[in-house]
Amino acid sequence: MASAREAAEAEFRRFDTDGDGLLTAAEIRKANEALGGQGASESEIEAFIKSADRDGDGTIGLEEFVGLVGHGRHEKA
Ligand SMILES: [Ca+2]
Ligand SMILES: [Ca+2]
């Protein structure tokens, strides 16, 4: 059984289509569509990145993603 962190890491790797260890706005858009979204708007994607981007580089790294997902949807028991 995967831990919340492992699940978040697996999700991150699936979204990181070029494998550089960072999620860009374009990758987040694709991820959103893959999850059944109808195409997030620029401002929605921007807001999502801002909510997770702790070091302010404009992309979401693995730790930032785990911090966001690990403490939200996949809350630990
Ligand atoms: Ca990437
Ligand atoms: Ca960042």
Image (cartoon, rainbow, N blue to C red):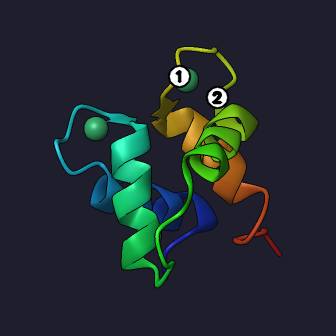
- The CA span between labels 2 and 1 is 7 Å
**Residue type, label 2:** Asp
Outermost residue to the right = 77
Question: Is residue 58 shown above or below 8?
Answer: above
Question: Dot 1 corresponds to which residue?
Answer: 58
Q: Is residue 41 left or right of 36 when viewed as pictured?
A: right
Question: Is residue 44 shown above or below 47?
Answer: below
Which residue is more in the foreground, 65 or 50? 50
Under circle 1, the secondary element is: loop
Which residue is more in the foreground, 11 or 46? 46
Q: Residue 22, position in %: x, y?
A: 37, 33
Q: Quadrant of ligand 1?
A: top left
Question: Is residue 40 shown above or below 24?
Answer: below
Q: Residue 42, position in %: x, y?
A: 55, 46
Q: Is mark 1 within 8 Å of ligand 2?
A: yes
Residue 53: which disc? 2
Q: Are marks 2 and 1 in contact (CB under 8 Å)?
A: yes
Q: Which residue is at a point 53% across and 14% down the rendered structure image?
A: 57
